[in-house]
Amino acid sequence: MALPIVAVVGRPNVGKSTLVNRLAGERDAIVHDEPGVTRDRTYRPAFWQDREFLVVDTGGLVFDDDSDFLPLIRQQAEVALQEATAAIFVVDGQAGPTALDYDIAAWLRQLPVPVLVAVNKCESRQMGQVQAAEFWSLGLGEPYPISSIHGSGTGELLDQLITYLPAGETLPEAPQIQVAIAGRPNVGKSSLLNALIGSDRAIVSPISGTTRDAIDTVIEHHGTQYRFIDTAGIRKRGHVAYGPEMFSVHRAFKAIHRSDVVLLVLDALEEITEQDQRLAGHIADQGRACVLIVNKWDAVPEKDTYTMNTYRDRLYQRLNFLDWAEALFVSAHTGQRLDKIFAAVDAAVEQHRRRVSTAVVNEVIQEALRWHTPPATRQGRQGKIYYATQVATQPPTFALFINDAKLFKDNYRRYIEGQIRQQLGFRGTPIRLLWRSKK
Ligand code: GDP
Ligand code: GDP
């Protein structure tokens, strides 16, 4: 069966060949003798997940900045795109949209092939989201910030790309949520993991992580797979001698990095320490969803109706950058409220991936402005928010296009963030605001 073809198009110097090299890796170019695959184009085999395809670099198609498309060049490009199942339109995020990009976009829009906009040279994650947002104006749907040199962002691009390619033989995988269990030594991480496994008969693993030596544990619960990341150290406990490096902060940070959501486990019998705060800060910085698990609740003496609320208040006070996270009071020993953990994880992940329409975001911003305008300077200069839009998920990230960042002080920025939370929720996930001045 002929493999689907993915054409990479764009003006010169945006990074098309760098992207093709990244997608195809070391695999050799092939000169195809199938009908329809012609002449001077080079086809390189590539794959993503279970899908194989050929990438063709239309590098020979020169779109000169000074001239319009020459008809001949355009015809050649058209031939390349005719046999393509999908196209990747590469643009330069550092340069922003150019007149030629708009021309190419207009031309692509009238072709029947689905097009993905790859905004290249976005090395910085935060800036990349802002840079990419500018390419919505091409009218080709969501722009994907990537760096062909570093490889960042290409995963999301490819995830979307393969939805346009014919399905392979393999069955679709069950949805999987990556969970990191983090916490100081002795808070009860291993007891908790064992209790969670015990409550679910359908344990799939332990299986090796695909890329490194870490051992993950996968549990299936109500049709969703939960991959507990790097549980080697946690599970071995009690059976095998282990060194303190098993609980190194470095290792915890690595697990957090791979996760969608972190269970931050705390010991109800102990004060919240600096180490807890450090982990909490890291989770927020990394933009991961989080559920706070206060373990050993069974051992808290003389509980009354206020105990939990008092503890919760103190918890959010000490871990104030996680004040958006749900806190569950559980016992790994008695099993109390353990059943709530999966539901809390699902809810946090859903919010982490949630996308709000631009219309709704702007309604919230307008309303916030009506209640409380940005304070003016003594010279009478006033901060203005022209427009806001959600530019990313995981975590939800909003770009606010403003006249001058200097006119927005921290307390006003916190006010806007608070309004977004109050109106739109996002419980369980951090959110990010990018304040973008007009030049
Ligand atoms: P093409 O003409 O579209 O095929 O572009 P190339 O792949 O030859 O790249 C053009 C230039 O952009 C080269 O100098 C690359 O090193 C640079 N470039 C390509 N990808 C990236 C990227 O992701 N980030 C940055 N900063 N530069 C890139
Ligand atoms: P880890 O180092 O975070 O993996 O912690 P462990 O799971 O090894 O637990 C440390 C200690 O706390 C052990 O002595 C456990 O028996 C105890 N422990 C764990 N969970 C609970 C709980 O829910 N209630 C009580 N009372 N003790 C617990």
Image (spheres, helix red, strand yellow):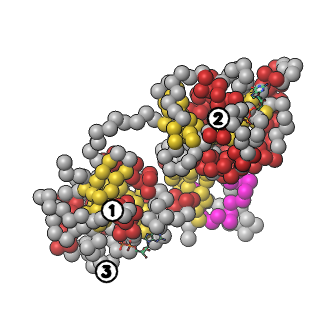
Tell me if I can see residue 13 in this picture: yes
**Foreground residue among 371 and 62:** 62
Q: In the picture provided, is 1 more to the left or to the right than 340?
A: left
The label on residue 82 is none
Q: How far across and how far down the image is residue 136, in percent?
A: 42, 57
Other residues around mark 2 within 10 Å, as few (<14) / some (14–19) / many (≥20) = some
Which mark is in front, 1 or 3? Answer: 1
Q: Amino acid type of disc 2?
A: Arg
Q: Which residue is mark 1?
A: 27
Q: How far across and how far down the image is residue 250, in percent?
A: 68, 52
**Foreground residue among 317 and 166:** 166
Tell me which image quadrant ligand 2 sits in. top right
Q: Which residues are magenta?
A: 400-414
Q: Which residue is mark 3?
A: 66
- For label 1, the SS is loop
Tell me if I can see residue 96 in this picture: no
Q: CA distance from mark 1 to mark 2?
A: 39 Å
**What is the total number of numbered labels drawn onto the structure image?**
3
Q: Amino acid type of disc 3?
A: Asp
Report the residue at 58% width, 62% height from top: 436
The numbered mark, 3 or 2, whose residue comes first in the sequence reads 3
Q: CA distance from mark 1 to mark 3?
A: 35 Å
The numbered mark, 1 or 3, whose residue comes first in the sequence reads 1
Whether residue 413 is in magenta: the answer is yes
